[in-house]
Amino acid sequence: MTSASPTGPTPPVNAEIFEHLRDILAGKLHIAPEHITVDATHEDIELDSLALVELSLVLEKELGVRVSDDELARTPTVAGIVHLIEERSASAHAGK
């Protein structure tokens, strides 16, 4: 018998955004790329509050997406961060 994840199955993520996020996490925040999976939590990849602030700044600078460190802190997995970026990107493009 397998146990289900407490949050349910991970919804599919935008592969392009995931790859870009993984590049940012590995390149700018020095997280081992092999640890960055869609199911990885902040604890799994050692994203502390300072790293979340830095990630927030890098996302705005590199992707033009505003996501606060508080929002990132409330998003428990890499998949959640990808969905948040995707949502903000769509909102930004809809406003143009």
Image (spheres, rainbow, N blue to C red):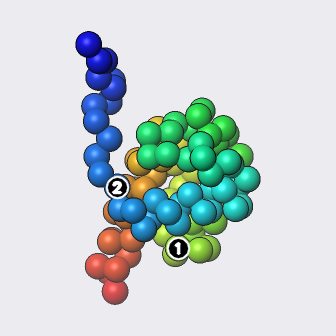
Horizontally, residue 74 falls left or right of residue 27, namely left
- Mark nearer the N terminus (2 vs 1): 2
- Amino acid carrying mark 2 in the image: Val
Q: Disc 2 vs disc 1: which is toward the camera?
A: 2
Circle 1 SS class: helix
Assess disc 2: are there few (<14), some (14-19) or many (≥20) residues with their C-alpha within 10 Å of its C-alpha: some
Where residue 41 appears, as percent x and y from the top left, is 52, 36
- The numbered disc on residue 78 is none
| Relative to 14, residue 92 above or below | below
Picture mark count: 2
Where residue 17 appears, as percent x and y from the top left, is 44, 65
Residue 87 appears in the figure: yes
Which residue is disc 2 drawn over? 13
| Relative to 34, residue 68 above or below | below
Assess disc 1: are there few (<14), some (14-19) or many (≥20) residues with their C-alpha within 10 Å of its C-alpha: some
Which residue is disc 1 drawn over? 63
Q: At 35% from the left edge and 62% from the top edge, which residue is drawn? A: 14
Work out which residue is located at the far front of the displayed protein and give it. 1
